Amino acid sequence: MPKQKITKQVVLQGAFSLIQKEGIQKFNARNLAKQINCSVQPLYSYFSNIETLIYAVYDFSTHYYNQYIDNQINPTYLFQSIGKGHINFAYEEGFLFQFLFLSPYLHAIDFEDLCHKIERTDVTQNLRNTLHLNAIQAEDLYMNMMLYTHGIACLIATKAATIRYDEMSERIDRAYFAFLQKIQEEKNAVTHP
């Protein structure tokens, strides 16, 4: 039986699978080589070092996450379905969630940078159109809800808490309406001083 050729895609897929199953903490060249049944040499023929490979896997994982979220979208409830999809991803793909959002590979320097790395312009535009918000208000609502749902997702992904779906959903809805009410009050204060 001929020996399997280890391609760059095999290395990348193997690294993704290892992080998906065991987490970034267990990721190293030896464990990856074992995962794809080769020596460590082929890993370095495609990637100059482990850090370069991890960033390639991060990009691959980001694409996987975006596809996952796209499959969760309900066009009627675009904003809500994306937030709940983010939480579902934490439930179903805890190690990948931690790798993407709780590791230094995210490289967000502040809230605004974090938002721009994660933000979907289609959602911001949807908020502007459906709620009659300006760009700043839509981004503010998006950021507040993203941080709120992300907090819940972090508790779930790290197994710090077990939260019932109905309780989580109710709290997310309450937070959404509270953030929206605050924006509406500020908007009214400006137009009717």
Image (spheres, rainbow, N blue to C red):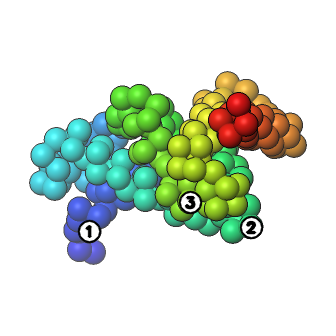
Tell me which label, 3 or 2, sits earlier in the chain: 2
Circle on res. 125: 3
User: Which of the 4 image quarters holds residue 12?
Assistant: bottom left
Q: Quadrant of the N terminus?
A: bottom left
| Position of residue 24 in the picture relative to residue 155 (left or right) | left
Q: Nearer the viewer, mark 3 or mark 2?
A: 3
Tell me which label, 1 or 3, sits earlier in the chain: 1
Looking at the image, which residue is at 12% across and 54% down? 45
The x, y position of residue 97, in whole percent, is: 53, 42
The x, y position of residue 53, in whole percent, is: 25, 47
| Position of residue 139 in the picture relative to residue 186 (left or right) | left
Question: Is 58 located above or below residue 167 in the figure?
Answer: below
Which residue type does callout 3 highlight?
A: Gln
Tell me which label, 2 or 1, sits earlier in the chain: 1
Judging by the rendered image, the residue that carries numbered circle 2 is 76
Neighbour tally class for label 2: few under 14, some 14-19, many 20 plus, Cα within 10 Å = few
Of 39 and 100, nearer the camera is 100
